[in-house]
Image (tube, helix red, strand yellow):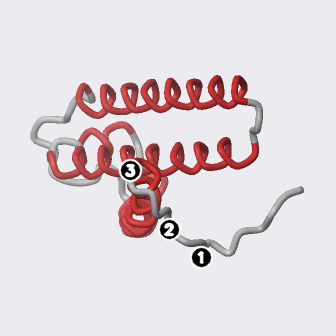
Amino acid sequence: MLRISSGRGPRPVAGGFETFSWYYFRISGALLLVLVIVHLFIMHIANDVSCTTYAFVAMRYSNIFWRVFDWLLLTVALTHGMNGLRVVIDDYVHAPGTRMWLMSISVVLLVVFFMLGTITLITFPTVPGATGPLCIPK
């Protein structure tokens, strides 16, 4: 039977990984909220969505700050989400073999998506000499 959590459960008292995970989930959630709001404001409110083209992103990535910002967003979102998936698997999958396989698959997915995102952010070519958006909003 599914149990609806209030999110106010006690923190783990044993220490170790579960305590770290408990704190990380809360801190990463707060950080993620700020990062996502900034991302949404920059990409969808401050700039016209129709101007979000390859050239716009390349121009944005000519500043190292935006690459680091997007890498931080990628890192926090992936680890926060996979930590949540780990908790769900731990709570609802009772067979040890199945739990081990699902946890292993989630770790592999975390590593693959993290590597793909990081490689994309590092190797994305910039537009030299670009000064601003290459689109005039209607």
Give the CA distance from mark 3 to mark 2. 12 Å
Residues packed near mark 3 inside 10 Å, few (<14), some (14 to 19) or many (20 plus) = few
Q: Nearer the viewer, residue 138 or 125?
A: 125
Vertical comparison of 77 with 7: above or below:
above
Which residue has dot 3 on it?
Answer: 16
- Residue at image position (59%, 76%) is 8
* Amino acid type shown at disc 3: Gly
- Residue at image position (27%, 38%) is 58
Q: Is residue 104 left or right of residue 62?
A: right
Viewer-nearest of discs 1 and 2: 2
C-beta proximity under 8 Å, tags 3 and 1: no
Give the CA distance from mark 3 to mark 1. 20 Å
* Amino acid type shown at disc 2: Arg
Vertical comparison of 113 with 68: above or below:
above
The label shown at residue 136 is none
Give the CA distance from mark 1 to mark 2. 9 Å
For marks 3 and 1 on the same chain, the one whose residue lies earlier in the sequence? 1
Give how far across and how far down residue 133 sits, in percent. 28, 53
Give how far across and how far down residue 18 sits, in percent. 47, 52
Mark 3: secondary structure:
helix
Q: Is residue 87 left or right of residue 131?
A: right
The answer, for residue 48, to whether it is visible in the render is: no
Mark 2: secondary structure:
loop
For marks 3 and 2 on the same chain, the one whose residue lies earlier in the sequence? 2
The answer, for residue 10, to whether it is visible in the render is: yes
* Amino acid type shown at disc 1: Arg
Image quadrant assignment for residue 7: bottom right
The label shown at residue 11 is 2
Image quadrant assignment for residue 123: top left
Which residue has dot 1 on it?
Answer: 8
